[in-house]
Image (cartoon, coloured by chain):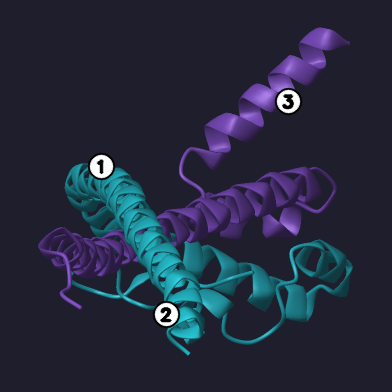
Chain colours: A purple, B cyan
Amino acid sequence: MKNSPLTTILLAALALSAVLSLVLCWFYIGNTRELRAMEETVGRINYFRQLSSALAFDATEYSKTHPAINPILEATIPNFKAISESAQGAKQGAK
Amino acid sequence: MTMDTLENKAPAQSEVSELREQVESLRHLIGSILILLVVVSGTFNIFLLRQWKTSKTQLAFQKPQVANMVALYQKNEQPAIENFIKKMVDYGQTHPDFVPILNKYQIKAGPPPSTSSPAPPIPGASAPAAPQKK
């Protein structure tokens, strides 16, 4: 019994297509991994930024009752003096 | 005797022709399935190709931006943030009433987590990436 040439051709096309799928899948997964790694890095940076600004805010609030922390905040937070003065001004204006 | 042989031959031939028909029908079926598989596989390949191209474009667009962002962060913000947290921790060691604020952010006394465990380098960035703190 002879094999039909059409079947052979179709099988070859299918094999080729499967190999191509594997290669494309490999490339795509590589790119996706790289993208995810970058997103993770950006997320970590943003998280740390948020954490430090929240800590700075809490420390500023704390400084209202504990002025001993002020020298540290003045040294580490840029424009801390202006921020605290404007906050106090706003508070007095509200009263 | 000859009558018996003739009677046996006739059904045998009909069986063979029936089998031939079945083989032909199977061959057609396999051909159809193969064509269908090639079409499905080709469609999947086109989908994968498009996905790959999209991710490649996105990567080419984001890579320099993220690398720049990380470099700027590491150059300017990270030292300032680490210094700030270190000073807060130092302050907390001498002022116990400040410790609850540190605990709120899970900052323990000692070196801040940012300095202790640098994140794996991101693609395109020259130095270690943002600090790991979860």
Quadrant location of the C terminus of chain A in the rendered image: top right
Question: Type of residue at label 1?
Answer: Arg
Q: Is residue B52 left or right of residue B134?
A: left
- The label shown at residue B118 is 2
The residue nearer to you, when weighing A39 against A70, is A39
Q: Is residue B51 left or right of residue A76?
A: left
Q: Write down the quadrant of residue B134 in the picture.
A: bottom right
Residue B125 spot, x, y in % from top left: 21, 65
- Pinpoint the chain carrying mark 1: B
- The label shown at residue A88 is 3
Q: Residue at x 76, y 79 (%)?
A: B94
Quadrant location of the N terminus of chain A in the rendered image: bottom left
**Residue under numbered circle 1:** B50
The residue nearer to you, when weighing B113 against B83, is B113
- In 3D space, how far apart are the residues under numbered discs 1 and 3 (Cα atoms)? 57 Å
Answer few, some or many: residues within 10 Å of disc 3's Cα (few below 14, many 20 plus, some between 14 and 19).
Answer: few
Residue B5 against residue A79 in the figure, above or below: below
Residue A63 spot, x, y in % from top left: 75, 49
**Which circle's residue, 1 or 2, is located before the other in the chain?**
1
